[in-house]
Amino acid sequence: MNIRLFLIAASALLSGCASMYSTPPAVVHQPMSARPEIHAQKPVEANGAIYQVAQGRSLFEDRRARHIGDTITINLVENTSAQKASNANASRSSSMSGGITSLGKVPLATLAGLNAEAGMDAEFSGSGSTGANNTFRGTITVTVIEVLPNGNLLVSGEKQLAINQGNEFIRFSGVVNANHVTASNTVQSTQVADARIEYKGSGYIDEAQRMGWLQRFFVAFMPF
């Protein structure tokens, strides 16, 4: 029984170590890439030296992405800034007084001359502020994974960088209006609808910057 528990614990530990260096899960549109569609073609009889009958595009057609499997370069030019501040003040006060002037020939006559006063003061003051600044610059080439009925392109892609003993992952997806694609087959990320951008890392350096699962448990459930 003890050996079985040891094997279970060892397998869990090894799986945890393996997942430490695995690709982080993505929230961008899936899949990351798509193969071009296969179109039925008639048998080619003969080709010339310049003109090719089997060529999918004409000689004078631009090379902008428009079909599934085509690639397009996204220029990441994200720059966001947000500021928020709030203040609140509230106060309230009240007072009350009363007394018994005179009592004669009645029970509890000794209470004559008794005075009573009561008062309450309440005050509240609160303030808060928050700010965020984010900048993302770079380029990533993505693949058209779907052509929508109105001609828009659903694109998705990933770039992986292996640096020393860690991996960096840049992922991007969104909907591109074909009219925004330039002649050089590029588009700005600010012109992409439903854009999802990720920049994550994996490896022991990235793990060292994360809070342990036991510590996260106590942070989530500690009442103070």
Image: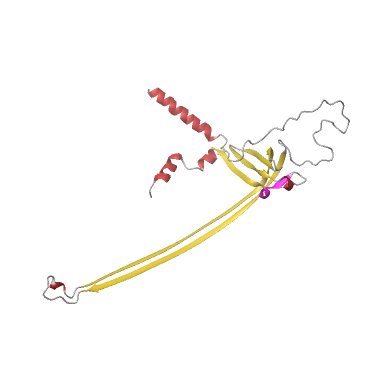
Query: Quarter of the image holding residue 63?
Result: top right
Percent of width and height locating residue 205: 54, 40
Among all residues in the image, which is located at the extreme front?
106
Magenta stretch: give its range.
186-191
Percent of width and height locating residue 193: 65, 47
Percent of width and height locating residue 13: 47, 31
Q: Is residue 208 left or right of residue 77?
A: left
Percent of width and height locating residue 181: 73, 46
Query: Quarter of the image holding residue 149?
Result: top right
Can you say whether 128 is above or below 156 in the image? Answer: below
In magenta segment, residue 157 = no
In magenta segment, residue 189 = yes
Residue at x 35%, y 69% (from the top left corner): 93
Can you say whether 106 is above or below 72 in the image? Answer: below
Residue at x 43%, y 65% (from the top left corner): 89
Q: Which quarter of the image is occupied by the N terminus? A: top left
Residue at x 45%, y 63% (from the top left corner): 88
Number of callouts: 0
Q: Is residue 106 left or right of residue 8?
A: left
Residue at x 13%, y 70% (from the top left corner): 108
Q: Nearer the viewer, residue 171 or 105?
A: 105
